[in-house]
Amino acid sequence: MKKICLLFLILPSILIFQSCNNISSSTKTTKNDSNQDANIERKVDSVLALMNLNEKIGQMVQYAASWDVTGPASSEGNKFKEEKLKKGEVGSMLNVTSVKAVREAQKLVMENSRLKIPLIFGYDVIHGYETIFPIPLGESASWDLEIIRKSAEVAAIETSAAGVQWTFAPMLDVSRDARWGRIMEGAGEDPYLSSKIGVARINGFQGDDLSKNNTIAACAKHFAGYGFGEAGRDYNTVNIGEHELHNAVLPPFKAAAEAGVATFMNSFNEIDGIPATASKKLQRDLLKGEWAWNGFVVSDWASIAEMIAHGYAKDKKHAAELALNAGSDMDMESYAYEAELEKLLEENKVKLSDIDDAVRRILRVKFQLGLFDDPYRYCDEEREKNEIYTKEHLEIARDVAKKSIVLLKNDTVTTKKSALLPLSKSVKSIAVIGPLADDKDTPLGNWRGKGKYNSAVSLLEGVKSAAGDDTKIYYEKGIELTSKTVAPGENQFLHLMEFNTTDRSGISAAVAAAKKADVVLLAIGENAFQTGEGRSQTKIGFAGLQQELLEAVYAVNKNVVIVLMNGRPMDITWAAENVPTILECWHLGSQSGFAIADVLFGDYNPSGKLPVSFPYNVGQEPLYYNQKSTGRPMSTQVTYSGYNDAPKVALYPFGHGLSYTNFSYGNVSLDKAEMAKDGEIQVSVNVTNNGTRDGEEVVQLYIRDLVGSLTRPIKELKGFEKTMLKAGESKVISFTINTETLQFYTAKNKWEVEPGDFNVWVGGSSTTKNKAEFVVN
Ligand code: BGC
């Protein structure tokens, strides 16, 4: 409190009164809290009134800690940053982590600048800070909104304990393309699921009170269209129709804005010729206008300056003009605003009111976070010592990880007359084989925050800890997946993958191990750095010698369980056609091996469902379940919309996932067959667990609008419920269909329900045929 009063000694007395009396009140982000909102607005205005132009522009500048666009910054570069911090001409820093580092940077501002406006510190906490959770795509396979919220909450606790109060997450980019490396960072291909999961993550990060010192500001990114880059190539051109943009891409962002996400990040890509960073339509008109959202928009890393390379801005000055006029509030690492905004203002190319609006938005979030109350409120050495990578957090990470696993296939094998999984703990022998079997690093995935190199529990470790004392475990790596692995401390962004391995010398030992074991666990898939930013691929099969290893092992022992570790949908067609059991284990984070063992041995009955379609081969990409019909959907003749050489549907569809028990669905029943446009229909279905084990099922509701002013997808997810059913238990699961369920962005460019015929399905995957019909009048 003392610091705050000191801070405001420079303010006129009326402000001192306001600040010292009101400023420490808790500031909620909940939109209904109008008193607190008004209070913050008054404070924001009073600070803004004191600021000169340089200070205002400074708030719109974000610097990275130690490296810039062209690589590691020189000490000269850092010196320059230090001077700017001291002058109060920087609003934010990214990649400054640890209480010590944050405190030092904050001190430069608080002890030297005129107005002492605290910095906000941002960092990419994508799936955990140091306790690493499954990659977001994997976690999304849990369809469990509460544990997803929980994992973000833990990430917020750890992040804030390290001094940082802003994460650049969640990524809300719907993506339909397995080639795109960043598909690992989102919630998959469906806008409805992505909206629900995005909001769960935002609620986890931000909690119900942003001013608490263990909650952090979230960032809805990348606004917008980034997941639709042509050919799955990162940063690539996006050509998407206006209606598809509204119906497929924007819903998770709208949901995030409504949930009160503190910040947005714009995106690198252009849409229909306009870089998103310069899109007034998206940022000013839609986000800040129509959606009335009041947080701030940070640019993506140098996305303002990159408009020069796009061929949209002629120089940095022009880029700054375009970005500000479009509503980009904070410049991450382009150095464009600090250099050009003053000149642009003098030339009347930008407006002071837009600068003021941007600063107001940035200050608002800083007030909401309580940074004006105490700029060091997140700098607590005790918390840093005690609240990061704790036993409790690791337990939660294990829980999230096991719930993210998807059992893709578990066929009965003739020799056993049952499926391979779950394994009995008294199984005589297990061969644990493969380049990822004892890999302690890959499970951390890309974007692993401060996850320590080689700190994950490997599959082998997990199996050893779960198997009975009498079980023999034979481990063989077989092959190396890559010829270059990431070294401790190596910058992940600079790490290039290489798969030119030719060393087959370990395969014979792997085959020998497979031969003598009752069952083989074969851990293959992708290295951690095959997915993530800048890691698009034209091949999505098993890289390197993995397929060779798979076939060699399978040739001597048919009892193979593939433990798939990956960050994107893969082409696993050969495996699916031959191997009896496939367990999708993504990159599951710190507790990976324990979580996988929980599922392998049946301590946890798998409940995950795919949030993305798995194709037969890469040529089908982009592949997604909620596609349109085309004029030739039939498959009985040559001239239909399919392929000569592959099915047009997925190998494993969206929503698919098996359990160790069986669920059956009764007929879909509706409480009425007709509804008014603004009415409701209750849909219910009886779900039964027919097996002998308890299990959770994700009951999914899909609809189809048969005829529209625009063509509509053949199926759209509009509801789901994850429910536990005891062995033999039946439950009626109900959903309400209403305006929100049925509306879409129509040919009239507005969200509305169009009267007509609809289908509704309820089942355990997007391929369910369990259907009813109704009419909207
Ligand atoms: C990514 C963003 C990220 C930013 C800061 C960019 O390259 O696209 O998602 O938040 O870097 O690290």
Image (cartoon, grey):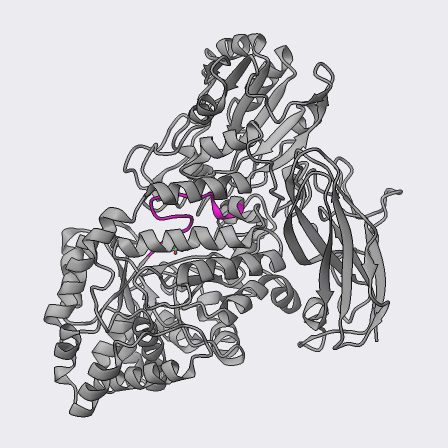
Identify the residue at image location x=47%, y=79%.
32
Q: Residue at x 33, y 81 (%)?
A: 40
Name which residue lies at 15% across and 79% down.
Answer: 5
Q: Is residue 77 above or below residue 678?
A: above
Q: Is residue 544 left or right of residue 489?
A: right
Question: Who's the residue at 43% across and 77% down the image?
Answer: 294
Which quadrant would the C terminus be assigned to in this image? bottom right
User: Which x, y percent locates residue 66?
Assistant: 23, 52
User: Is residue 473 found inside the magenta-colored segment of the image?
Assistant: no
Compared across the picture, whether 237 is left or right of 626 comes to left
Magenta part, dominant SS: loop
Outermost residue toward the right?
A: 636
- As drawn, 239 above or below 30: above
In the foreground, 391 or 317: 391
Percent position of residue 163, x then y: 25, 57
Give coordinates of residue 174: x percent, y percent: 57, 56
Q: Which residues are magenta?
A: 123-137
Q: Is residue 130 magenta?
A: yes
Residue 48 place in picture, x, y as percent? 26, 83
Q: Nearer the viewer, residue 43 or 636?
A: 43
